[in-house]
Image (cartoon, rainbow, N blue to C red):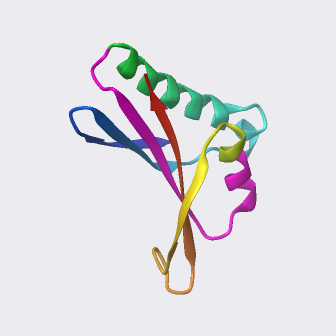
Amino acid sequence: MLVLEDFHEQEHSIWRIKNLAILKNFKQIGCERQLIEQCMKQVRDLIASEKIASAKIEVYVAGEDKELLTFYERIGFKQEGILLDHYRLGESTTVIGLVLKR
C-alpha cells in the first residue's frame, strides 16, 4: 500500500509518502523501489508538463531503521532533519527528502 499526500503551491509542490507497506516476498523482487520510482516519475511528469516548476518528495522514517534510510539514500533522498518524540515519546523520526525541478 502506498499513500501520497500533496501540498500544492503555484510553483512548488510537496509530496509526502505517508505509508509504504510491502510484503517481504515482494521486497526481494524490487517492488518497493519500483513504487518509489513510479512516484518520482509521476512528479517529474507534472514538472515536465509545466504544471509546477519544482517539487519535493518527503518521507518520515520512524525509529532508527538504518536499512530503510539506506534504501532511500541510494535512490537520491537526503536526510533533512530529526524530529524528537514525534510519533512516540523517546523515539526519533528522520525526515528525508528529494527535490525535483525543471
Q: Nearer the viewer, residue 87 or 75?
A: 75
Residue farthest to the top? 49
Asked where in the image residue 8 lies, by quadrant, the reply is top left
Q: Is residue 8 above or below residue 102?
A: below
Q: Is residue 78 magenta?
A: no
Q: Residue at x 21, y 33 (%)?
A: 10
Asked where in the image residue 82 lies, by quadrant, the reply is bottom right
All told, the count of numbered labels is 0
Report whether 42 appears left or right of 50. right
Residue farthest to the left? 10
Give the percent coordinates (x, y) of residue 46. 36, 21
Residue farthest to the right? 28
Q: Residue at x 62, y 44 (%)?
A: 22
Q: Is residue 59 magenta?
A: yes
Name the quarter where the C terminus is drawn: top left
Give the percent coordinates (x, y) of residue 94. 56, 64
Q: Nearer the viewer, residue 13 or 39?
A: 13
Report whether 59 appears left or right of 69. left
Give the percent coordinates (x, y) of residue 93. 54, 69
Q: Residue at x 66, y 34 (%)?
A: 33
Report whether 96 appears left or right of 7. right
Residue farthest to the bottom? 90
Give the percent coordinates (x, y) of residue 81. 53, 64
- The segment highlighted magenta reads 50-71
